[in-house]
Image (spheres, rainbow, N blue to C red):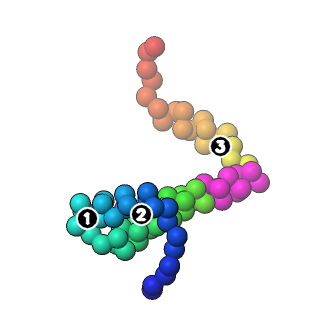
Amino acid sequence: MKTAISIPDGIFSRATEFAHRKKITRSALFTAAVDEYIDHHREEDVTRRLNEVYAKEDSALDPVFARLQSLSLPKEEW
């Protein structure tokens, strides 16, 4: 898909130089950059949704499971 966007001159120049050094097109660079940005922020969305769930639900470990878990750990001298 073709699109038109406005980019500050300085960023455009840096992107052009970078793409040239990496031997890729500017389109490939901008595509990779947007894809990476979206992936990065998708993780934030997952965190936000998990926080919403844990705000509504009790996340405390069942006392029986907590005891079994502590019994499964090796004994150590401190």
Query: In front: 59, or 48?
Result: 48
Badge 3 density bin: few <14, some 14–19, many ≥20, Cα 10 Å? few
- Quickly name the residue at label 3: 61
- Residue shown at 30%/59% (left/top)? 18
Q: Residue 62 in the image: x percent, y percent? A: 67, 44
Q: Amino acid at mark 1?
A: His
Q: How many marks?
A: 3
Q: Amino acid at mark 2?
A: Phe
Badge 1 density bin: few <14, some 14–19, many ≥20, Cα 10 Å? few
- Quickly name the residue at label 2: 12
User: What secondary structure do most residues of the magenta stretch adopt?
Assistant: helix
Please state the extent of the stretch shown in magenta in the rendering.
47-56
Query: In front: 39, or 34?
Result: 34
Q: Amino acid at mark 3?
A: Leu
Q: Are marks 3 and 1 in contact (CB under 8 Å)?
A: no
Q: How far apart, in angstroms, are the residues tagged by discs 3 and 1?
A: 55 Å
- Residue shown at 30%/60% (left/top)? 17
Which quadrant of the figure has residue 56?
Answer: bottom right
Q: Residue furthest right?
A: 56
- Quickly name the residue at label 1: 20
